Image: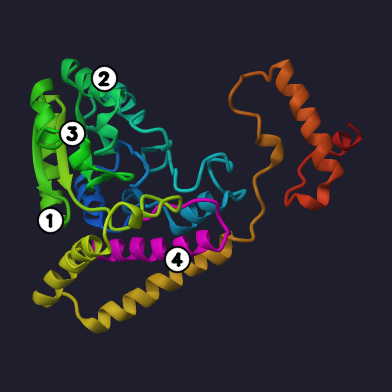
Amino acid sequence: MYRKMVLLNTFDAIMLNVQRQGRISFYMTNYGEEAAHMGSAAALDPADVIFGQYREAGVFLWRGFTLDDMMNQCFSTHQDVHKGRMVPINYGSRDINFVTMSSPLATQIPQAAGAAYAMRMSGKPLCVTCYFGDGASSEGDAHAGFNFAATLDCPLLFFCRNNGYAISTPTSEQYRGDGIASRAAGYGISTIRVDGNDVFAVYNATKAAREVCIKESKPMLIEAMTYRIGDHSTSDDSTTYRTTEEVHQFKQDSPITRLSTYLVKNGLWDPDKENAYREEAKSKVLEAFHGAKDRKKPPISDLMTDVYDRMPAHLERQAASMRRHVNMYSEQYPVQDFLEEDKAV
C-alpha cells in the first residue's frame, strides 16, 4: 500500500507540472487522501463494482489500472479506452470493474444504488462501493441514492471522503449537523467514522463494512475524515480561501508521512529504500509520460459514434461538414483517419 501511495504521489507531482506546461487541459491531484484510496481498495474484492467521483486515482492503481492507461486517458491518445471523449482524470475500466467517472457531482450515487440492487438480485456474494466527497453529499442525488439503497436492501458501501472542502466551501459552511455519518441513521443505514489518514483504520473499517453489506444485504456508510492538501484542481487556487499555515499543518501528518514513520519504526523501511523507490517511481511515471505525449489522437471519425444505434440525419450532416473541414486543413490535425472517398466530400 505504501508503494502505491508513493507512486500516486509521484504521478500527481509530474502531471501537475505537465498541466501547468499546457500539455494537458486539466488535472486533479490526490495529495492527502492516499490512505483513503489504498486502505479501502485493498479491503474490497476485485470483482466488486466501484462508482467513483473523480478523486479516486489510487483505487485505479490498486486494481491494476496502469500508468500507461492513466497517461493515455489524460493525453486523450488513440490508446485511450474512452476514445478521448472524457476530461482528464475521469478514468474508467470494465476490466477492473470501475464504472467510468463523470464530473457532475453525485450522479454516481443513485446509479450505484441501482447497480447494487442488480447485484443483490444476481445472488453474487459481492457488493458495490460508491465513493463521493463531502460536497457531493449536499446534492439531491445523495438523498435519492441513500434512500433507494436502504429501502431496497442493497449491498452498497457508501464511502465518503470528507476532505474538509467542497472546492472552496469549508465543511463549516456546508452543514450544521455532525458531518456525513450522522445522516445515515435517518435513512436506516449503519455507519462508521474513521481516520481517513490512517491506512490501517480505513482498511479494517472497509473490510468490516463490506462483510455486513454482503452477509446482511444492506448498505453501509463510511465517513473517512481526511484533508485535501492540494488545490481542488488545476482550475483552483486554494490560497484565496485557506491559509498556507493550515495546509502546512496537515502536511506534517499526511498519510504517506504517517505510514512511512510506522514502517521505519518497525524496521520495514529505511531512508535508502525510500530514496531508491522514489527514483524508481519517478522513472516509471516519466516513461509512461514520454510514451503518451506524442501518441496520435483517437480517430476523428469516432467523434460522433456510440450514442445512437444509427446516426440521425442531423449528425450525418455535421459529420460531413467535419470531414470537409479536417481534410481541407489536414496539416492542423494529428490524426487523418478518413477514408479516401471522404476526401472528395
Q: Amino acid at mark 2?
A: Ala
Write the residue at 80% across / 30% down: 321
Would you place residue 236 above or below residue 92 in this image? below
Q: What SS does tag 2 mark?
A: helix
Q: Which comes before the other along the chain, label 3 or label 4?
A: 4
List the residue tagged with mark 2: 144
Mark 4 Cα shell of 10 Å, populated few (<14), some (14-19), many (≥20): some
The Cα–Cα distance between marks 3 and 4, rounded to whole angstroms, is 35 Å
The Cα–Cα distance between marks 4 and 2, rounded to whole angstroms, is 38 Å
The Cα–Cα distance between marks 3 and 2, rounded to whole angstroms, is 18 Å
Write the residue at 22% across / 36% down: 174
Residue closest to the far front: 240
Q: Amino acid at mark 1?
A: Phe
Instruction: Judge from the rendering whether residue 73 lies leftward or rightward of residue 43; answer left or right.
Output: right
Q: Is residue 158 visible?
A: yes
Mark 1 Cα shell of 10 Å, populated few (<14), some (14-19), many (≥20): some
Q: Tell me where residue 206 appears, x and y as whole percent.
A: 15, 43
Q: Which comes before the other along the chain, label 1 or label 3?
A: 3
List the residue tagged with mark 1: 200
- Mark 3 vs mark 4: give the one in front: 3
When asked about the image quadrant of residue 171, the answer is: top left
List the residue tagged with mark 4: 14
List the residue tagged with mark 3: 175
Q: Which comes before the other along the chain, label 3 or label 2?
A: 2
